[in-house]
Image (spheres, rainbow, N blue to C red):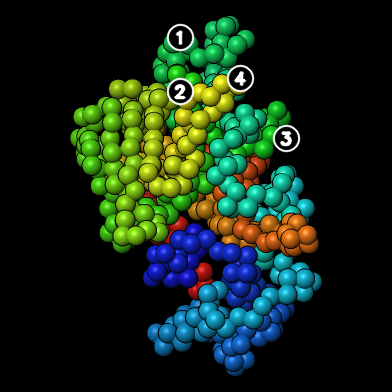
Amino acid sequence: MRAKNYNNQVASFTPLEPQHMVRVALVEGLKPKYDNGERQRYRRLLKDYTNVDESRIDKLFDVIRTEQRSGQQENFLNALVNDVAYDSGNWKSLDYEALKKEGVIIEHNGRLKSLAGLVQETDESKVIFVPSVGGRAVSPEDEPDYFKHIDWRSKLVLNGPDVVKRFALDNGIELPDNYLSNGRMTNEVLDLLEQNGFYFTEALKTAIEVLKQPEYKDRVITALAIKRKDGTELRLHPHDFLEAAEFYSYCLEHKANIIETLGNKLTQVGDKYHGANTFAVPKRIPFRRKGFNKVEFHYMPDIQEDGEHPLDWMSTRATCDCPHALNMRNFEERRGKTTRVVETMDTHANMVFLAMLKEKQIGISHAVNNMSPIPTEELSVFIDKTRYNLVQEFTVMEENSIKTKRTRVGEVNIEKIINELAKNPEWTFERMYYQPGKVGRRFLRQMYI
Ligand SMILES: [Zn+2]
């Protein structure tokens, strides 16, 4: 993620609105990595769109270029950056049409096939405007509804036939005929998968290969799902994997611990209770003095290989009491009947896995059932561009007149784009998630410096 300075937790974790994104991009364009013509253009635009004294913008232009800055220059730069920060009061209103002509805003039709590539190659000094992302525009406030009713074609089931068959093919496993014809999970298939190490990580790795298959070319995937034996479902969203890694890094740095309130998973030895475990996980934006969310797990898998129940990830239940996760819980309709609750493993639940990796000192290469895989730096930068450099601009009818609405793209759309990226042959599991070594501060980038 990117934030001004991380001094203010609420501000750092509040998503940026379109005008903020353009403001950040305008300052970004002054950086020395861009060519001189471009830097000059951004300097001129900053003068046009802010009330900041022109000489201060010229100073900013000079100091931001200096790689080795003295302490005095550093303080000076911080003060200049505060003048033009996205939340400063010095900004005038933006003329989006003019900024399109200046090349700060790039317009795109929003079709997923080319959008993922465009996001990848676009600098952080530009903002991409699309009418919608791969379909109708979904405003962030409409997302819970959208996420509740996900069409089967928009889900990729990690233990479903497409992934299982591909895993069998890649590993020379012969699947029974009845499974090949009807795809219904049996104990016989489960035994085969267990013997061949079909851990969560292997399932995800295989799913990323499945996305590259021609049958998925035109499918817009918004969620990964795990089907449990009783027919219920746990949904996962790759975007949450990154949010979990970011907020967990932040918590480590600020000494905000995840506390296990039932069970002993977060200890070196701990796996005493196979059934339920509960955790208090810090909130990103504390609300009315309530600083923690309550996360509850059942059948949390053993992260490390050679655990007693390697396929527990297929039975895991995860719930969180934050409004977001509660809102996503839903009764699914199946053949006209209301069936059981669908759960979403959210950022807070994901963070428990990261805490467990740390407490048990499990290296990434042994973390076979880490259900919150840690994105690579490259994937994190890519996802950041969908959060800080991408805007939906569309028209709506309001009070009998047509109004232009601009919103950030929100999680549903970010999921679509990440899954579209995974269809690219070059974006393997390793490139997306496998980064050995310490997480450190690499997910908490500063915006301006
Ligand atoms: Zn939560």
**Secondary structure of residue under mark 3:** loop
**Secondary structure of residue under mark 1:** helix
* Image point (44%, 15%), residue name: 190
Q: CA distance from mark 2 to mark 4?
A: 18 Å
Q: Give the residue pinned by disc 3.
A: 218
Mark 2 or 1 closer to N-term? 1
Q: CA distance from mark 2 to mark 3?
A: 27 Å
Disc number at residue 124?
Answer: none
Q: Nearer the viewer, mark 4 or mark 3?
A: 4
Q: Give the residue pinned by disc 4.
A: 335
Question: Is mark 4 in CB contact (under 8 Å) with mark 3?
Answer: no
Mark 2 or 4 closer to N-term? 2
The residue under label 2 is which amino acid type? Arg
Considering depth in this image, is 394 or 414 the residue closer to the camera? 394
Q: Give the residue pinned by disc 2.
A: 228
Q: CA distance from mark 4 to mark 3?
A: 25 Å
The residue under label 4 is which amino acid type? Arg
User: Is the residue marked by circle 2 packed among few (<14), some (14-19), or many (20+) residues within 10 Å?
Assistant: some
The residue under label 3 is which amino acid type? Asp
Q: Nearer the viewer, mark 1 or mark 4?
A: 4
On the image, the x and y values in percent for residue 382 come to: 58, 54
Mark 2 or 3 closer to N-term? 3
**Secondary structure of residue under mark 4:** loop
Q: In the picture shown, does residue 47 fall above or below 267?
A: below
Q: CA distance from mark 2 to mark 1?
A: 16 Å
* Picture quadrant of residue 96: bottom right
* Image point (58%, 31%), residue name: 156
* Image point (33%, 37%), residue name: 296
Considering depth in this image, is 33 or 119 the residue closer to the camera? 119
Mark 3 or 1 closer to N-term? 1
